[in-house]
Image (cartoon, rainbow, N blue to C red):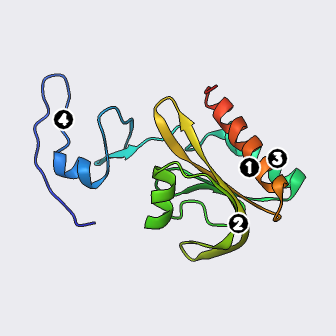
Amino acid sequence: MKNVNFVKNIDNLGRIVIPMDIRRQLQINTGDVLSITCNDKDITLTKYSNLDNNYKINEILKLFIEVFNIKVILMNKECVIYSNVVNIGTKLNNALKDLVKNGSSIKLQSSEMIFGENKVKGVYNMLPIITNEGIEGSLIVFGDNNEKGYQMCTVLNKMIMLELNIS
């Protein structure tokens, strides 16, 4: 992504307009939620996901990993946000971004998936995490080549959506 500079005025209510070119490039749409952070001299706007840094969801995943000895990858639309097999924060490649964005469901697929420098091989199941605001991300569970891996993915997916207060 190329660096783009704009100079904008803040109005009397403290608002600033994010230029259309930037919103298109970063896929920021009307109604999207942004997180605002700052330090001594910079303000950073980041697309916010209900999945990011959700302690309860991370604890649910950790418990399932320990009890059932499964491989799990939880992703928002941009990167890995929790996993026991790949690095957290790893950016998704374009193919994975498209799968997440489209809310793809994959059942008992056997292949190698690449997450940055990590390769994960095996049978996986992938389900979208959907809230009232739309698709938040996806969950991937690696398991055996049978129905139990898919069932495990389905149970975890439903627990995550319940935690996000979605019925």
Q: Horizontal placement of 90 versus 3: left or right? A: right
Going from N to C along the chain, the mark reached first, 1 or 3, is 3
Vertical placement of residue 152 versus 144, above or below? above
Going from N to C along the chain, the mark reached first, 4 or 3, is 4
Q: Amino acid at mark 4?
A: Ile
Q: Amino acid at mark 3?
A: Leu
Q: Horizontal placement of 74 versus 153: left or right? A: left
- Write down the residue under mark 3: 63
Dot 3 falls on a residue whose secondary structure is: helix
Mark 4 vs mark 3: give the one in front.
Answer: 3
Across and down, in percent, residue 81 comes to: 58, 53
Going from N to C along the chain, the mark reached first, 1 or 4, is 4
Q: Horizontal placement of 17 versus 58: left or right? A: left
Q: How far, Cα to Cα, is label 2 from label 1? A: 16 Å
Q: How far, Cα to Cα, is label 4 from label 3? A: 43 Å
- Write down the residue under mark 2: 85
Q: Amino acid at mark 2?
A: Val
Q: Residue at x 51, y 42 (%)?
A: 136
Dot 2 falls on a residue whose secondary structure is: loop
- Write down the residue under mark 1: 153
Q: How far, Cα to Cα, is label 1 from label 4? A: 42 Å
Mark 2 vs mark 1: give the one in front.
Answer: 1
Mark 2 and 1 residues: CB-CB less than 8 Å, in contact? Answer: no
How many residues crowd mark 3 within 10 Å: few (<14), some (14–19), many (20+)? few
Q: How far, Cα to Cα, is label 2 from label 4? A: 40 Å
Across and down, in percent, residue 56 comes to: 70, 37
Across and down, in percent, residue 101 comes to: 46, 51
The one nearer the camera, 24 or 12, is: 24
Mark 1 vs mark 3: give the one in front.
Answer: 1
Dot 4 falls on a residue whose secondary structure is: loop
Circle on res. 31: none
